[in-house]
Image (cartoon, rainbow, N blue to C red):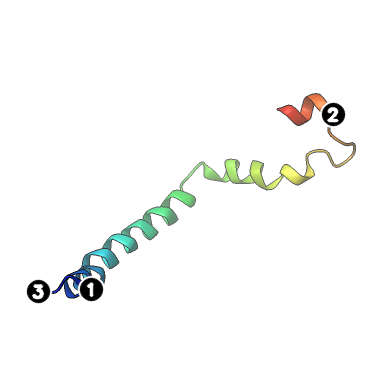
């Protein structure tokens, strides 16, 4: 059997299945309970210093 044919068959079967399982795992990780607080905090980063610019001390943390 040629190497190309072997790799093609592997990609068409097991690799497709493993990438689909990885995709489902990522979706479950993103929508897991308790993750919304993390994403909310990250989404609010641009608005943390809306009234005044960040001081030098705040910028380091």
- Residue lying furthest right: 52
- Residue lying furthest left: 1
**Which residue shows up at 83% across the image and 38% down it?**
49
Tell me which numbered mark, 3 or 1, is placed earlier along the sequence. 3
Query: Can you tell which quarter of the image residue 10 is in?
Result: bottom left
Residue depth check, mark 3 versus mark 1: number of the one nearer the observer: 3
Left or right position of 54 against 9: right
Q: Are marks 3 and 1 in contact (CB under 8 Å)?
A: no
Residue 41 x, y percent position in the rendering: 65, 41
Tell me which numbered mark, 1 or 2, is placed earlier along the sequence. 1
Report how far apart the C-alphas of labels 3 and 1 lie in the structure: 11 Å
Depth order, front residue of 59/28: 59
| Quarter occupied by the N terminus | bottom left
**Which residue shows up at 82% across the image and 27% down it?**
56
**Residue 55 disc label:** 2
Query: Can you tell which quarter of the image residue 9 is in?
Result: bottom left
Q: Mark 2 packing: few (<14 Cα in 10 Å), some, or many (20+)?
A: few
Q: Mark 3 packing: few (<14 Cα in 10 Å), some, or many (20+)?
A: few
The correct choice, above or below, for 41 with respect to 24 in the image is: above
Left or right position of 58 against 10: right
Residue 33 x, y percent position in the rendering: 48, 44
**Which residue shows up at 52% across the image and 44% down it?**
35
Report how far apart the C-alphas of labels 2 and 3 lie in the structure: 66 Å
The correct choice, above or below, for 45 with respect to 3 in the image is: above
The residue singled out by tag 1 in the image is 8
Report how far apart the C-alphas of labels 1 and 2 lie in the structure: 57 Å
The residue singled out by tag 3 in the image is 1
Left or right position of 48 against 24: right
């Amino acid at each position: 059997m040629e190497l190309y044919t072997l790799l093609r068959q592997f990609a068409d079967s097991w690799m497709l299945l493993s990438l689909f399982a990885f995709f489902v795992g990522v979706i479950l990780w993103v929508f897991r309970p308790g993750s919304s607080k993390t994403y909310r905090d990250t989404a609010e980063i641009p608005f943390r210093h809306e009234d005044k610019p960040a001081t030098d001390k705040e910028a380091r943390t």
